[in-house]
Image (spheres, rainbow, N blue to C red):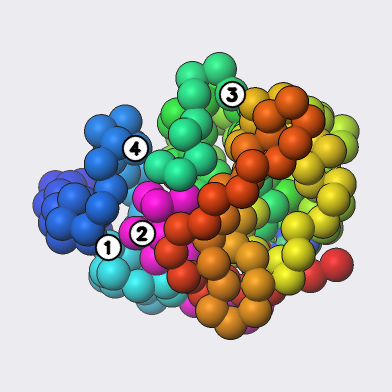
Amino acid sequence: MNSAEADLKIERMIQTQMINRDIRDPRVIGVFRKVKRHLFVRPKDIDYAYEDTPLSIGFGQTISQPYMVAKITETAQIEDNDKVLEIGAGSGYQAAIAAQLCKKVYTVEVIKKLAEFAENNLNKSGINNVEVITKSGFHGYSEQSPYDRIILSAAAKQIPVKLFEQLKENGIMVAPVGTYPQTLFRFTKQNGEIIKEHFLNCVFVPLVR
Ligand code: SAH
């Protein structure tokens, strides 16, 4: 796909899948123009990269639907100086989007081949403020904690407590919680307490141990 073709498809994606729904933050919308989703899918899916759907990336995993990435990113209220942790790098697309809005993203991926896929996609995209870590993030990634934001890109029945511990005061975690379908939650840490808000239903692959 050439860049003019990609840009055309991106504008259509932003209009129909984001603005015509409920995505409002111009900062969030803007980054979808910068990060090319066709660099994060498998070669055979390039023509479908800007469609309103998740796509398989192998190993039983998927790159999330563009709208879901936008919704999660908007809900996370990421700020310029933030240090962000993502659990579940997959293709690296969510990490790439978040990285345009903050200082640094650490993204943890349990499947080695997918961690390599993510790393490669991020390199192709010229993104250099994302670090991909190959390991299970079930208990977070304490090495760089605490974080301003945590994005869980796989679904947990319950949020592992260690993740809350790795969140800064006034930090925000966005996560799909429950069994099929899950609910997207935002957890805000205030005075050591967790404030919980829920948003839409969603479907994510399960967070493994
Ligand atoms: N954010 C991704 C979508 C990821 S799908 C994207 O934008 O493409 C969920 C990913 O979570 C899968 O790649 C899966 O392997 C990974 N995953 C599941 N449990 C995990 C765990 N405990 N630690 C790290 N990664 C995990």
Gap between marks 4 and 1 measured at Cα = 16 Å
- Residue 44 in the image: x percent, y percent? 38, 75
Q: In the picture provided, is 54 more to the left or to the right than 152?
A: left
Where are the magenta residues, as a range?
56-73
According to the image, label 1 marks what residue? Answer: 50
Do the residues bearing badges 3 and 2 touch, measured as CB atoms within 8 Å?
Answer: no
Query: What amino acid is labelled 4 in the image?
Result: Val
Q: Which class describes the residues within 10 Å of circle 2: few (<14), some (14-19), or many (20+)?
A: many
According to the image, label 2 marks what residue? Answer: 66
Q: Residue at x 64, y 65 (%)?
A: 177
Do the residues bearing badges 1 and 3 touch, measured as CB atoms within 8 Å?
Answer: no
Q: Earlier in the sequence, mark 3 or mark 2?
A: 2
Q: Which class describes the residues within 10 Å of circle 3: few (<14), some (14-19), or many (20+)?
A: some
Q: In the picture provided, is 54 more to the left or to the right than 99?
A: left
> Is residue 158 in view?
yes
According to the image, label 4 marks what residue? Answer: 28
